[in-house]
Image (spheres, rainbow, N blue to C red):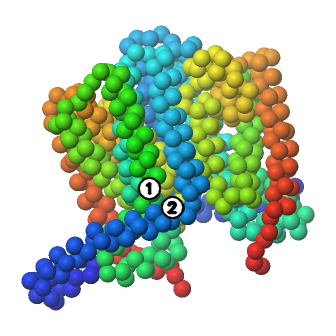
Amino acid sequence: MSDCSSNSTPASQRLTAGARNWLYYPDLYASLWRNSLTRELGFKVNFLLWLLVELVWFALQLSFISVIYRHTENIGDWTKWQVVMLVGASHFIQQLFQAVLLVNCAQLSELVHTGRMDFYLVFPANTRFLVSARHVDLGGFVSAASGLAVMIYAAAQMHTTPSLTQMAAFGALCVAAVIIHYSVMFLMATCSFWTVRAQGLVMAYYNLFSLTRVPDAAFSGAARAIFTIAIPVLLVANVPVKVLLGKMNSLWGAGLLVGMSLVCFLISAVVWRAALRRYSSASS
Amino acid sequence: MGTHWHIFKLGLQNTAAYRTNFFFRAVFNLVPLVAALALWRAIFADGKESIAGYTLVQMLSYYLIVTMVEITTAVTEDEWQIATDIKDGQISQFLLRPLGYFQYRLCLFSANRVIYTAVAFLPMTVIVCWNLQYLLPPANFLSLLGFVCSLALSAMLQFLLAYLTALLAFWVLEISTMSFMLLAAQRIASGEMFPLDLLPDWLNRTLMLTPFPYCVFFPASVYMGRVEGTALAQGLFMQGLWIVALFVLVRLVWSRGLRTYTAVGG
């Protein structure tokens, strides 16, 4: 909000203006959803094809797991159906992120190179909100449902029924996980302000977050520390699934996931501000 | 030859301008490799001697070699560029020139591979040094020779598959979905995700009838000496056969596409 508030207005007026502005966001977001829905309806075949692509890639990950478990009983302390649940959860979280945020992050470099970023800077709304949330990919929700279905199937195979508390904790941790997805991707996209072109950004993101599907027990030593603390991809799906399965002995892991999501978000915010200061229009 | 050399040099210069992007791409491409190495180490940790005929060292070697095959031969962005050229009408100029568009793209693809290999060399070396005890040398001199030949043929094969996918741009507006489907097929059927020996025998045999295993699995198997003698000659022949078949298909689709092609604008 700092983009549009003036320092010279009295504090009380600033507060009411601020509150009014915040109330304006749900309406704004609803319009963005309506726009996205209209756009998607215009390309129905494309919409269905993308759903198919996501489904094929998800099936690919699951077949990888089934091939591996033809030759082993466990990976660390993870059994086959536990890993299937992990892959399902990883897909669920990634698709939720994809539905509401990914496509926008991927297009950020495009906005910078074409100079269309100018329009978003002059709109009377938070620029980061606009560039992050302007498109909604509704297919992502359908794909997320397929991830959830696989998780339920895996739970049935293990004869496990998580308690309501476990499910609520899973939901909350998924939100933290989506924030990590968003912050890391947004951070990478923001770098397009510095580099000439952020080609292959989405591929880089997919490669990095492919680690979320790997059971954390596979990693040890420096690699585990790097992918837990420096780039917390090993926390993203592992922690929520461990909570569901009752594999967590303490709250430490859950706390770390929430803490890291806040740290990542703050870092991405700092870099975003630095990038905006450096931005000079590319248009005209 | 002179013209091709000039285009190759031009491609080198153009691609070198985006070397930072290539570098980041190369670094992130190595993340799944790190994951695969960790995963197989954990699987072998309970004292298994071998899995589907692979010891731990052979399994990790396989993944390191596969990554090197990918770095030197995989298509990076060529199919998107070809599709854009078709959509934007850029191919019109090639219809009037003595140089064919296919040769032009092949020169650019070669230039891309050279720059990408150069840029990926450093991060790959770091990973290899980190896992040096797990990188086996080529089984013998003949394996090395066969590997180099199969590598060149694999690059051509992957280029043709990507080119064919890109030609769909004559008919559809957006080739991304097709391109991701091809990538998915390549991931699983080419042996990128795991050695195809891990699959049930019937499935492995069926996959060997498709062009995909000849992109990655075959060159890696040649390097490791798992394919020798007659099987090596047969494999190289199959690679050649697929190249010829796909080339014929590309020509056919190209001429069909040109019939529907209309260039808009100047």
Height in image: A233 above or below A124?
A: above
Can I make out residue B224 in this image?
no
| Circle 2: residue type | Glu
Query: How many numbered marks does the figure carry?
Result: 2
Q: Quadrant of residue A240?
A: top left
Q: How many angstroms separate mark 2 from mark 1 (CA)? A: 8 Å
Instruction: Identify the residue at image location x=55%, y=44%.
Output: A52
Task: Indicate the quadrant containing the C terminus of chain A: top left, top right, bottom left or bottom right.
Answer: bottom right
A145 or B110, which is in the foreground? Answer: A145
Amino acid at pointer 1: Leu
Is A71 situated left or right of A168 in this image? right
Question: Where does residue B85 sit, x and y in percent of width and height?
Answer: 72, 64
Q: Is residue A175 visible?
A: yes
Determine whether, in the image, residue B195 is placed left or right of residue B3. left
Location of mark 2 (residue): A40
Please, what secondary structure does the residue beneath circle 2 have? helix
State yes or no: discs 2 and 1 in contact (Cβ < 8 Å).
yes
Residue that appears at 74% across and 17% down: B228
Residue A138 marker: 1
Towards the viewer: A45 or A228: A45
- Furthest toward the bottom, the residue is A8
